[in-house]
């Protein structure tokens, strides 16, 4: 499943449009990475499938703060804090 565990980004559908304006269906896939993170507050490693947007947010806020923020919003990340 190509779904970001933190942002919920998933494939969307659209069209390939040729020069002659002919349209065929295609999928736009999210930019996903399987990445391990160390959470110093809980002293454990977690492996997450995250999008590049989520990685940028983690770099900006820190993994623990970002997971806490998502928890407050009610997003199920699958990580116990």
Image (spheres, rainbow, N blue to C red):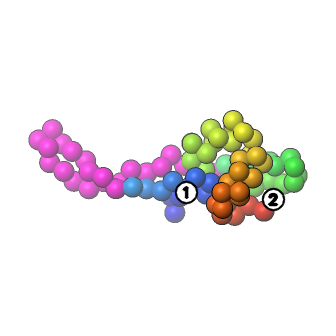
* Nearer to us in this view, 10 or 45: 10
Q: Which is nearer the N-term, disc 1 or disc 2?
A: 1
Q: Residue 69 location, x and y as percent?
A: 71, 51
The residue at which mark 2 appears reads as 81
Q: Secondary structure at mark 2?
A: loop
Q: Residues within 10 Å of mark 1 (few under 14, many from 20)?
A: some
Residue at horizontal 57%, vertical 42%? 53
Image quarter hosting the C terminus: bottom right
Q: Secondary structure at mark 1?
A: loop
Residue at horizontal 71%, vertical 58%? 71
Q: Are marks 1 and 2 in contact (CB under 8 Å)?
A: no
Q: Is residue 73 visible?
A: yes
Q: Residue 44 location, x and y as percent?
A: 84, 54
Magenta stretch?
13-34
Q: Main secondary structure of the magenta part?
A: strand
Among all residues in the image, which is located at the extreme left?
20
For residue 17, the mark is none
Would residue 28 be found to the left or right of residue 57 on screen?
left
Residue at horizontal 19%, vertical 51%? 23
Residue at horizontal 81%, vertical 49%? 39
Q: Is residue 49 visible?
A: no
The residue at which mark 1 appears reads as 8
């Amino acid at each position: 499943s190509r779904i970001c565990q933190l942002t919920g980004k998933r494939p969307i559908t659209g069209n390939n449009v040729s020069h002659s304006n002919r349209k065929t269906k295609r999928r736009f896939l999210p930019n996903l990475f399987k990445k391990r993170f160390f959470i110093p507050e809980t002293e454990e490693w977690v492996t997450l499938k995250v999008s590049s947007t989520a990685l940028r947010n983690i770099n900006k806020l820190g993994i623990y703060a970002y997971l806490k923020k998502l928890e407050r919003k009610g997003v199920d990340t699958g990580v116990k804090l």
